[in-house]
């Protein structure tokens, strides 16, 4: 059952379309990630859903009601900004109580109860009397989430909430966030430019570029069945290798690009002559950088070899490398879209 | 809903504009009124019941020392602004970057000095001016006005410089500049709005200042606008009202227009200097 | 042979550079503020007059004699009262105006130019304008009130066809307060506008999503966040009004009788017009303790409200 329905949504700032025709159906209880590079329109899209911007065209409905003309407070949404936007002059308790007070229909006792309940869910009961400036990054994030959920919104909007945390904290914060979302079952829309975050968190991912959704699907779908070259190269670290083949583009992922001797079943494979120029040993994997004979000299092709695999490779010389046929991807040269397989 | 809000804004702003500017409009009308029109209580003060005349303007510009007053105020203003900038810019930078712990205290101290008013100091200050041989010249003002503007300017610029990240100067120093050169080449260009704020405040100060100008200077040709106009144009019990009004309006309009151009800079300078510390 | 390295890197030696850059300001202030201030105290404790320049110590005699006069007493009360009253009005009006100006609307530039005019003209000249506006015989206000049949024989505001603003005790006081508000409102508004524009937009967006109405956002988010800058604005207007001589001097000369007298004007009358420099200095010195107390109070409150 779709809880958020977006159709034909457009938002222009002057001449520039930040959001250029977006259709989305978000299901009850799912965690949808909107992924894309800076400037792709993902934050604008989120602000449109929240009601902070008015669309130039299109419709938004939440929980079955048309919200296109409604202000943010009538939409039943909650939002967490990248900076967390905690009111610096209020205690944590007052911050969390703020949206409840704004609704005006709870007594002081009810508000107190709800705030304590929400604080309990996020484990921040001890912080209720502190001010934001006394909190760490992780604590602030929890307060922001607490404030968002205390009004039991239909939709929770998160705008890059993990970017302000340092790298180590990010992984555990991601874990906490997902468990929090599963436990409460709130429909959540999460915006990010970090594809690892997206893959780790999302039930589904919508990949955006230049104001449009290029592909929407589960992490597996968009990774293994990328709909076009943009999605294919954006996802994966490093992204898919692309080779110009005259009238089409051939693609394969670095982890599927192995030395010939490590073959297991020759269920059809493509062979390449790979000249390695550089090796990066990352511990669990090794990355090889090089070029493929027969393709343009500028196209760097990357191979990812797990450390478990034996790797006698001559740097500088040509080595035979293969990709299994099922891992080959074909894209139309002009549009970049995925096409059916061709004979090589 | 948006229409209602827009209307609310106009509804609020218009009375204020009226309160602020209507006196000037009326002063402008009065400037051109003939005596016999002005000095009849039954006459509508907002209309020309007798044809308008340029006589009052003529009187102001050619039969008084008004133009000297304007010149004096301009010269004093310019020189005081220059002196203030020359002294307060390095002082503000020093307090922001180089003095450390008690830099903040010294900054507050600066601000408190600003609070020692001319009305307290004018009597002994007069003695100082006489001792320096500057009595009855505009130089007395050029020397004394910075005592009011420097503390405030230093405080504002200190706050301003503090809000600029030190990385930029440090990068310049690594690139081969000395700290002083880095100040000139990197920090100053970034401080335009702070400097604008200082210029506007200092100039306003010299334009408005009354008590020192009244006490130190007695010859009419040496007077500044602020004191010269009331003294010159009130001879005994006779007020040359139309010319007085003209004097006020002639200053207000150009200065007001210039200020409004720099208003954005002024606000930005204040924000950086006084708000974000 | 390169010059002595100690001098070459002088402009890098922060221990030297710091005080060096600060020195002109400090010297200026010590010389031209500190010294006269001490001199002021010396005068107040002596018998110096314009004629007799010798400084003979008389202890607190001057202070005792000036306190006795009714002009002084009224002056002290008025100085405080005018300041507080004008201050209160200014802070309320400036907030309203700054909030209205934070919106974008057509003609905003014109509005801002008009609003800044009272600050653009020298205080003395603007006050002269008001002097004529409030004139006892030819005031336009009188004329308008007469036209509206509120003034004149058999009307609400009395048999006379003139309000005589500056010759009636309470109207004169109100006029002084009014002119102070008129000339200082632009500055206060500019300062508050600076404060408002520095509020993080994300906080306001968050408040909108949190469901706060216009009034709730105003009172629970915006005003608390500009409280520090508001106290700076308060301090400025306090100082400007408390120590002001011009408005009263030009508008009423302290009249009618001495009902609008303020300490700065009284100090001038006694010290310069009257020739008794010592008494003038003594009167002026009364301003100092209140000023310092107010300044420290306001700065401390601002400190406590720092939210960053």
Image (cartoon, rainbow, N blue to C red):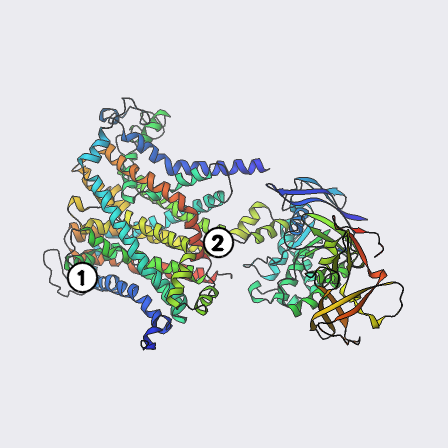
| Chain ID of residue with mark 1 | C
Q: Residue furthest left?
A: C51
Q: What is the chain letter for disc 2?
A: C
**What separation in Å lies between label 1 and label 2 (alpha carbons)?**
42 Å
Which residue is the site of mark 1?
C43
Figure check: A68 above or below B206: above
Query: Based on the displayed image, in which of its 4 quarters is residue B250 positioned?
Result: top left
* Front position in the image: A99 or B57: B57
Q: Position of residue B270 (x, y in %)?
A: 42, 53
**In the image, what residue occupies the spot 28% across and 47% down?**
B207
Quadrant in the picture for the C terminus of chain A: bottom right
Vertical comparison of B48 with C234: above or below: above
Determine whether the residue tagged by mark 1 lies in a helix, strand or loop. Answer: helix
Residue A156 falls in which quadrant of the image?
A: bottom right
Looking at the picture, how far across and down is residue C283, in whole percent?
23, 56
Which residue sits at x=39%, y=68%? B179
Label 2: element kind: helix
Which residue was labeled with disc 2?
C226
């Amino acid at each position: 059952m779709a809880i958020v329905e977006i159709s034909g949504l457009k938002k222009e700032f002057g001449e520039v379309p930040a959001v250029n025709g977006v259709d989305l159906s978000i299901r009850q209880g799912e965690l949808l990630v909107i992924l894309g590079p800076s400037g792709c329109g993902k934050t604008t899209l989120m602000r449109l859903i929240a009601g902070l911007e008015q669309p130039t065209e299109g419709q938004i409905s939440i929980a079955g009601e048309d919200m296109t003309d409604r202000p943010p407070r009538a939409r039943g949404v909650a939002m967490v900004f990248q900076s967390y936007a905690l009111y610096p002059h209020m205690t944590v308790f007052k911050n969390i109580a703020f949206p409840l007070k704004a609704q005006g229909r709870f007594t002081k006792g009810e508000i107190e109860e709800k705030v304590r309940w929400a604080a309990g869910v996020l484990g921040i009961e001890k912080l209720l009397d502190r001010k934001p400036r006394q909190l760490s990054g992780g604590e602030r994030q929890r307060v922001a989430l607490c404030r968002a959920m205390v009004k039991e919104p239909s939709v929770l909007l998160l705008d890059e909430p993990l970017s302000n945390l340092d790298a180590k904290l990010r992984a555990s914060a991601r874990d906490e966030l997902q468990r929090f979302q599963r436990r409460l079952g709130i429909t959540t829309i999460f915006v990010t430019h970090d594809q690892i975050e997206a893959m780790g968190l999302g039930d589904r991912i919508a990949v955006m570029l230049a104001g449009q959704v290029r592909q929407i699907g589960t992490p597996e779908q968009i990774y293994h069945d990328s709909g076009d070259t943009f999605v294919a190269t954006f996802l994966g670290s490093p992204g898919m290798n692309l080779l110009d083949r005259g009238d089409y583009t051939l693609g394969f992922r670095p982890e599927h690009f192995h030395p010939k001797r490590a073959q297991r079943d020759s269920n059809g494979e493509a062979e390449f002559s790979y000249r390695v120029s550089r090796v990066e040993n990352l511990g669990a994997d090794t990355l090889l950088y090089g070029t493929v004979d027969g393709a343009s000299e500028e196209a760097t092709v990357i191979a990812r070899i797990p450390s478990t695999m034996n790797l006698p490779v001559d740097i500088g010389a040509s080595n035979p490398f293969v990709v299994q046929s099922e891992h080959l991807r074909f894209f139309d040269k002009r549009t970049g879209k995925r096409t059916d397989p061709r004979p090589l | 809903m948006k229409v209602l809000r827009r209307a609310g804004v106009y509804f609020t702003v218009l009375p204020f504009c009226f309160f602020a500017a209507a006196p000037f409009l009326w002063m402008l009308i009065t400037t051109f009124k003939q005596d016999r029109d002005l000095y009849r209580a039954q006459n509508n003060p907002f209309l020309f019941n007798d044809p308008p005349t340029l006589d009052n303007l003529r009187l102001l510009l050619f039969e008084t020392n008004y133009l000297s007053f304007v010149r004096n105020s301009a010269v004093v203003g310019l020189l005081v602004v220059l002196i203030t900038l020359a002294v307060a810019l390095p002082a503000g930078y020093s307090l922001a970057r180089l003095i450390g712990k008690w830099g903040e205290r010294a900054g507050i101290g600066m601000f408190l000095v600003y609070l020692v008013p001319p009305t307290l100091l004018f009597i002994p200050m007069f003695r100082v001016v006489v001792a320096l041989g500057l009595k009855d010249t505009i130089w007395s003002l050029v020397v004394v006005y910075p005592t009011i503007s420097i503390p405030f300017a230093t405080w504002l610029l200190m706050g301003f410089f503090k809000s600029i990240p030190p990385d930029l100067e440090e990068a310049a120093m690594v690139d081969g500049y000395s700290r002083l050169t880095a100040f000139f080449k990197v920090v100053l260009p970034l401080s335009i709005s702070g400097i604008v704020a200082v210029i506007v405040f200092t100039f306003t100060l010299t334009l408005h200042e009354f008590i020192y100008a009244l006490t130190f200077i007695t010859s009419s040709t040496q007077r500044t606008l602020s004191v010269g106009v009331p003294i010159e144009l009130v001879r005994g019990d006779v007020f040359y009202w139309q010319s007085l009004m003209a004097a006020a309006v002639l200053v207000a309009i150009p200065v007001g227009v210039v200020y409004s151009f720099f208003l954005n800079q002024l606000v930005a300078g204040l924000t950086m200097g006084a708000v974000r510390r | 042979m390169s010059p002595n390295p100690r001098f070459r890197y002088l402009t890098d030696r922060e221990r030297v550079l710091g005080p060096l850059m600060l020195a002109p300001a400090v010297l200026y202030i010590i010389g031209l503020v500190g010294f006269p201030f001490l001199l002021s105290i010396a005068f107040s404790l002596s018998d110096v007059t314009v004629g007799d320049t010798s400084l003979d110590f008389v202890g607190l005699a001057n202070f005792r004699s000036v306190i006795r006069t009714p002009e002084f007493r009224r002056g002290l009360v008025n100085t405080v009262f005018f300041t507080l009253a004008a201050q209160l009005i200014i802070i309320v009006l400036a907030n309203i105006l700054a909030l209205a100006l934070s919106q974008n609307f057509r003609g905003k530039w014109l509005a801002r130019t008009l609003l800044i005019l009272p600050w653009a003209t020298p205080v003395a000249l603007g006050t002269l304008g008001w002097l004529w506006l409030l004139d006892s015989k030819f005031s336009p206000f009188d004329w308008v009130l007469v036209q509206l049949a509120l003034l004149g024989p058999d009307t609400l505001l009395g048999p006379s066809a003139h309000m005589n603003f500056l010759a009636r005790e309470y109207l004169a006081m109100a006029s002084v307060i009014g002119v102070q508000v008129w000339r200082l409102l632009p500055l206060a508004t500019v300062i508050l506008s600076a404060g408002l524009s520095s509020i993080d937009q994300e906080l306001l967006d968050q408040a909108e999503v949190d469901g706060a109405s216009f009034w709730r956002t105003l009172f629970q988010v915006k005003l608390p966040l500009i409280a520090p800058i508001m106290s700076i604005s308060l301090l400025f207007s306090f100082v400007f009004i408390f120590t002001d001589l011009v408005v009263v001097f030009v508008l009423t000369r302290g009249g009618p009788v001495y009902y609008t007298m303020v300490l700065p004007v009284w100090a001038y009358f006694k010290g310069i017009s009257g020739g008794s420099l010592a008494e003038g200095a003594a009167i002026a010195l009364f301003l100092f303790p209140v000023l310092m107390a107010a300044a420290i109070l306001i700065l401390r409150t601002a400190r406590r409200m720092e939210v960053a």
